[in-house]
Amino acid sequence: MQSVSIPGKGSISVNQYQWTEPSKTTWPGGVTQNRSLDGLLQLQDLQVNTLEKQTPLNPNRLGAESLSSA
């Protein structure tokens, strides 16, 4: 899938893939979502940025290490 059009709002576009998983997505309003994946395609880092270069969602490190220490 390349993109989905939402009437009256804009479109959601997948700009880059890592193997079969989306790694960069553009949302309506120009918000971008960048995902870093490991070799097993598990999410390692997530960054969301607006057109004004604001980061509404701070980068999170995800993975087994952070879950096992909880």
Image (cartoon, rainbow, N blue to C red):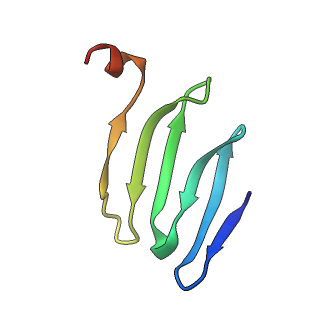
Question: Is the residue 62 above or below the residue 7 in the image?
Answer: above
Residue 54 in which image quadrant: bottom left
Q: How many badges with numbers are in the image?
A: 0
The location of residue 13, given as percent across then percent down, is 63, 64
Q: Report the side of 49 relative to 42 (left or right).
A: left
Q: Position of residue 46 (x, y in %)?
A: 43, 43
Q: Picture quarter containing residue 49?
A: bottom left
Q: From this viewpoint, which residue is outermost toward the left? A: 70
Q: Which quarter shows the N terminus? A: bottom right
Q: Residue furthest front?
A: 7
Taking depth in this image into account, of 69 and 51 the one nearest to the observer is 69
**What residue appears at the point 72 percent right and 61 percent down from the top-left corner?**
2
Q: Position of residue 67 (x, y in %)?
A: 34, 20
Residue 25 falls left or right of residue 47 = right
Q: Is residue 48 above or below residue 35?
A: below
- Looking at the image, residue 54 lies above or below residue 17: below
